[in-house]
Amino acid sequence: MPAFGQRLVQLGLATTLAFGFGAPPAADAAPSLKPYRGAGAWLDIFDGPTLRNPQAVIDRLAANGVRTLYLETANFRAATDVVHPQPTGQLIDLAHARGIKVVAWYLPSFADKNKDLRRSLAAINFTSPSGQRFDSFALDIESNAVSPLSKRNAAMLELSRRIRTAVGRDYPLGAIVPDQRGSSGPPALWPFFPYAQVAKVYDIFLPMSYSSVRAEGSTGVYRYTRANIDFIRARTGNPKTRIHMIGGLANTLDAAEAKAVVQAARDGRAIGASYYDLPLTGPEEFSALKRSPR
């Protein structure tokens, strides 16, 4: 995200059984998207000083009306499947005690599908000291380590489908995706991103709509944010596609721009909004998020 054959079949089945998931429920099961509604805040594995004080994190979120914490568990370069297990468990327990949801997210490379699957499921099945788990899981789809593009798309979709098979249809899954400029065509981070195919696996899109580096002024930020919402729905072919808007790097937005992100999310019928990331977030962003769509 916010940063950048047979053996696999056997591994996927073994992992599914090991983590206790049964057969997928009926195809018409509707997963709850409550974890993605309203105001959100983000933490990644590099936020060590912040992670060392989980109580302060949750107190800050609760005081500012944040409904969901998006917490990175690992990336493909990390030495372990869950990088900060102790504060992660504490954050889940403390957040749930205050009525705050916690969504795990992981950045895969798509080059090692075995590792990416294992680390995704490790996040999904992570258990806190009191036996609680994350409320949802979102895959950070942005690494361009695999080429050509056709191979990267195939690897991404295969991993996504294996995660979905493991958790079943009633578990909410989010797709963190590049913005319009990063996915429209060359030269872009992920040219011609396969939104329609991704929408068949995931329940909600979280576009990295970083207006802080794409637009200036409240009017420009508003237009850019709305354009990203409209772009995703056009590419999925579904005007009701669910979206949680990640509106930009928090410390590069002024008060008017922060409000423009939230207003565009509301007007575009997104179900939530946030900025990246919590240590960079100030009073202006928290104030704007109080009007986040719910």
Image: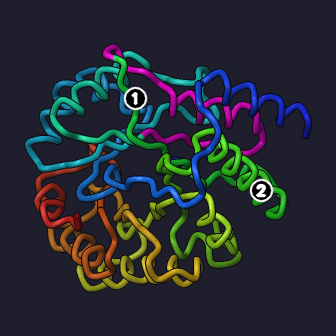
In the picture of the structure, the residue carrying the numbered disc 1 is 133
Question: Mark 1 is on which residue type?
Answer: Arg
Q: Toward which corner of the image does residue 131 lie, by quadrant?
A: top left
Its colouring scheme is rainbow
Question: Mark 2 is on which residue type?
Answer: Arg
| Label 1 to label 2: alpha-carbon separation | 30 Å
Mark 2, Cα crowd under 10 Å, few <14 / some 14-19 / many 20+, is: some
The tag on residue 152 is 2
Q: Toward which corner of the image does residue 10 lie, by quadrant?
A: top right
In the image, 9: left or right of 217? right
Span shown in magenta: 104-130
Residue 11, image x, y percentages? 78, 29
In the image, 124: left or right of 109? left
The residue lying at 75 percent from left, 33 percent from top is 12
The residue lying at 27 percent from left, 82 percent from top is 267
For the C terminus, give its image quadrant.
Answer: bottom left
Mark 1 vs 2, N-terminal side? 1
